[in-house]
Image (cartoon, rainbow, N blue to C red):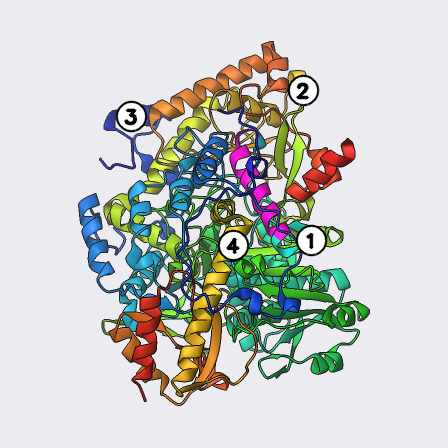
Amino acid sequence: MINYNKMIFELSNKGRVGYSLPKEIFSDYNIEQLEDSLLRKEELLLPEVSELDVLRHFTNISNKNFGVENGFYPLGSCTMKYNPKINEEMASNGAFKNLHPLQPSRTVQGAFEVYYNLQKYLSEISGLEEFSLNPYAGAHGELVGLMVIKSYHQERGDFKRNKIIIPDSAHGTNPASTVVCGMEVVEIASNKRGRVDLESLKSVLNDEVAGMMLTNPNTLGIFENDIVEITKLVHDAGGLMYYDGANLNALLGKVRPGDMGFDVMHINLHKTFSTPHGGGGPGSGPVGVTKMLTKYLPNPRIKKLDDYFYVENSGQALGQISSYFGNYLVALRAYAYIRTLGKENLSMVGRYATLNANYISNALKTAYELPISGYCMHEVVFNGLTNKDNDIKTLDIAKRLLDYGMHAPTIYFPLLFPQSIMIEPTETESKETIDEFINIMHKIAIEAKEEPEKLKQAPTKTPIRRTDEVFAAKMMIFSYKDYIEYINNRG
Amino acid sequence: MFKYFPHTKADIDSMLKSLNISSIDEIFHDVPKSVVFNGDYDVPSFMSESELRNHFASLSKKNQELTLFSGLGIYDHYQPAVINALTQRQEFMTSYTPYQPEISQGTLQYIFEYQSMIQTLTGLEVSNASMYDGATSTAEACFMACAVTKRNKVLLSSTLNPNIVNVIKTYLKFKNLEFDFVNEVSGSIDLDDLKKKLNKDIAGVIVQKPNVYGIIEDYDGFSELIKENKSLFIINSDISTLGVLKSPKEDGADIACGDCQSLGMPVAFGGPTLGYLATEKKYVRKMPGRICGYTHDLEGKRAFVLTLQAREQHIRRSKANSNICSNQSLMALYVTIYLSLMGKEGLKEVNNLSYQGAHYLYDSLVKTGKFTDPFKKPFLKEFTLETTIPKESIQTALLENGIFGGIGLDVFGEQYNGLINFTVTEKRTKDEIDNLISILGGLS
């Protein structure tokens, strides 16, 4: 059914319904009694379809998607690990899912207990004092973490500290979050070893620096082994250290951000703690801080007194950044994951993830150019093929992988190399799966040499082929209404 | 061995051998010894699946599932069974952002259909693929207005839900932008005060319909005034009500925003929900978030892709207008399935049934003589009354009967003392409503 090619609007047939609503009881009242000037006049363009129509439509389009349960998903920086089914079962529990966020504390003690204990577990795993689970996603966590840093300096009256140091290898969200937080970005170049260059760092440290954002392992998948010096240098200059938790999975059980000297961090629960990516969200980006910064965490906060949990809104907090408690049901899934693994298995996550990545790195380094030698952490970055003949690009390699039934790695990121291929296997993949991936990657390298057209034409076995992105940007067809107009104009 | 780790001892040995090392810990030799974590985390020991189920069963007992007469942004509407069945499909749930369109047409197509539905409900030309929630989408709308007009101040209606105001205030404060409030007059934004406060510094005006009191505000004359001042008009609406109420486009809005929780999502203790954001195409380059567009593949087959990505953080970095990356994609699927099932007739019926129940409750409560309406303005499914009955007595009496409702608006601050919110959706039965009336009628 991958040739299914309908939009839901095209199934519409006037008079068909897909719902069942209660009978009218209070027929003395009718919405038409509202003043006419308040009512909508414009027709709604919504489909009229049956329940089975809807099921078939969305089932058919789902078959054009690739999920973690379809096959290997080595998307670097995204930690596409298995999303456990039991977590879904727990999140569908009516005693959580049917709670209104304004219910009195005494009626939601179980929900608060999950929130409170999850933030405690995250604090322990991170070596920090306290977390807020309110931020909705990683980038939202970055913004909130930077707000904490800014609040800290401003409360001390140190208003000139408005600069955030960010390495050139950082995720794009780092500089974007900094600007949204009303601060300036100072970018520093990486050294030849792909790490922070200490001399460059020293040269930008001054009394205008509010802090530094760092991902460790960095986006090249390597550990910043000067981390102790880095955090000391920034602290000595009066700045705070922000840990971008996007790559935390590598360190589970081995290193805690707080112990490295970080003051503020976010965690992507949808990466390290197994909650589903949902085709791009909802994620969850809890923010953790050291003891001196807890007072700035956003409202509302869940506190505990004896065995009773309650909500606190503090005047010292940086403010409110979400309507209520963030993506609560996502956090609940992460809680179920942590309880399932327990301390025994949590401590193995980073080890297996890094073992898998190094096994791939070692097996592919002859066919693919490895720009930084040595051990990687949870992911490995290649710079295209070793053999650069035939003008085969990273894009071609990625698209060819799709033909072999695997998801592509992250490509063209980090920006440090022109042909970056970033591979992150995660700990939930078996040796067999990884061996198969390695074999396919070698096969593609041979194809690149012997049958380059196969790569340039790839993919050919997917529901669609390569797309015309220029057309999309030029025509700006963003809705079914636009589409109908386009078809009519085209004649 | 553990169920999420497929590594056997033999696997590990052979992998280590290929790396010429004898233990996994050697991989971490770059980590300074002083920061290596030795020992176990202070978290509980692992649980079997049965133990986890039992644990959640005992946590569940500490929560009370109540009959909800509560709203203020989170509504207890009917969720068709089809939604859960489809959103749980791993193809949708476990996939990543659709950066590889060849194997992501499922996600991209439902985003396109979602955008189409938001387009028709708001009447505006373009919707993005989703924001975190209604409050953050409104804050981003403020940023957009400032970017479009190159001005630094927004006007906020005093009748906005304080949760939205609080989030906007935080976002503006850190971005060094300013705001002021437009006064209210008998529960609605005051047009005269707006006139006074509009000037060349104002980037946008943000209003809410229905507002914090549940009142359906009338924006007759607003858009002309705001346009004349070259500011943007931003309307936050509970999206479900747009099935029957005048659309943001019909009200002359430049940006429409708000929450989509009312379209097929559980109340979920407040999240995840989804924020929608729509505008006219002339402003699309200042719009945050992902946008899906129609195109074709090299064989001419219909296809959908993420487009205009040069606006976004992963390309534009510090020059991007927003830092949003992950959004609430799966919740957009909830919306798309819900609206596919309901169609325009179902959405009208949901609103009408909610209207009928809410007005029956309103008349009955006013008839008891214990509740009065300080505003006497049109409303749809939620309304605000004044009462002399202490709000604690209301809450306690209702909770004893398994009901949550009659929320004292002073949860948002003392300026709302004495005001009580009631919300009725199509899920509330006549028995439930009559029970609520009889409990409240017996209080003093």
Which of label 4 and label 1 is nearer to you? 4
Q: CA distance from mark 4 to mark 2?
A: 55 Å
Say whether residue B152 is magenta: no
Mark 1, Cα crowd under 10 Å, few <14 / some 14-19 / many 20+, is: some
According to the picture, the residue beneath numbered tag 3 turns out to be: B11
Which corner quadrant holds the N terminus of chain B? Answer: top left
According to the picture, the residue beneath numbered tag 4 turns out to be: B347
Q: Amino acid at mark 3?
A: Asp
Residue range (magenta): B102-120
Residue B31 percent location from the top left of the image:
40, 45
According to the picture, the residue beneath numbered tag 1 turns out to be: B319
According to the picture, the residue beneath numbered tag 2 turns out to be: A391
Mark 4, Cα crowd under 10 Å, few <14 / some 14-19 / many 20+, is: many
Is residue A80 visible to us here? yes
Is residue B37 visible to us here? no
Q: Earlier in the sequence, mark 4 or mark 1?
A: 1
Q: Secondary structure at mark 3?
A: helix
The secondary structure that dominates the magenta segment is helix
Q: Amino acid at mark 1?
A: Lys
- Which of the 4 image quarters holds residue A153? bottom right
